[in-house]
Amino acid sequence: MQHLLFCSTIHLGVSQHFLRLRPSPSEHLPVPDLKEDPDPKYDPRKQDLAERTLKRKLGRNFDPVFMSINSPPVVENRTALEAQSRLMGPIPNQLKQLDLVTVGKKARRKFTQWLWAYTHCPVGYVWKDLGVRFWPRYVKEGQCLNERSCSFPAGMFCMPDKSVTKTFLRWYCQGFLQKKYCMWIQVQYPIISECKCSCVE
């Protein structure tokens, strides 16, 4: 996995020396905030943000489930993440097949359900504002709930296991001052899709 993969072969210009177009491989997700030149001169202008034009440039990569042009309602906060953690799905076969012959069927079922709830690692989603230099500006990021151990006995935590990539447009400028040249380029943005209970490295 990588923080952010840029499809373009354009080299980094002096004006955006804070931005890493070719970040080193990393297992750290969600993607951390990028460090770049805060000067608004390198922001897209109003005419550069024409929705119809940008949608055409992004094409089939536009995914309304994971990206939003306008600011989404602020409803998917920590409480929402915790609520999502209760949507666990079916109990895995390896838990159903535990050797619990010393207890009754009802007790065995309750224990299995409790163990599944305790060790399950769901993906919670929150909206993140990528800033005006990304289009669409908002991405729905996956997060692993790891405020407590997911193993019994304790010691393991929910960590990212798999990710999917979504294509966004990134406003990129070369050069500096009046000689700069800016355009939209496509970038690959990784999003956590699965979490698993594992040891912290």
Image: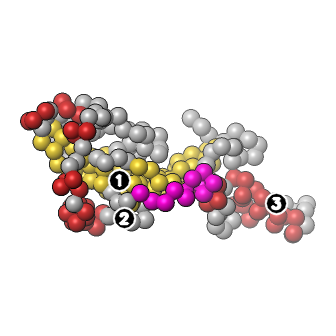
Disc 1: which residue: 137
Which residue is at 20% across, 35% downward?
12
Q: Between marks 1 and 3, how big is the CA–CA gap?
A: 45 Å
Q: Position of residue 4 (x, y in %)?
A: 35, 44
Above or below, 159 relative to 110: above
Disc 3: which residue: 111
Q: Position of residue 55 (x, y in %)?
A: 25, 64
The quarter holding residue 70 reads bottom left
Which span of residues is magenta-colored? 71-81
Q: Is residue 132 left or right of residue 100?
A: left
Residue 167 is one of the magenta-drawn residues: no
Q: Earlier in the sequence, mark 1 or mark 3?
A: 3
Q: Earlier in the sequence, mark 1 or mark 2?
A: 2
- Label pair 2/3, CB-CB below 8 angstroms: no
Which amino acid type is marked by label 3?
Answer: Phe
Q: Earlier in the sequence, mark 2 or mark 3?
A: 2
Secondary structure beneath label 3? helix
Position of the N terminus by quadrant = top left
Q: Between marks 1 and 2, how big is the CA–CA gap?
A: 12 Å
Which residue is at 22% across, 48% downward?
44
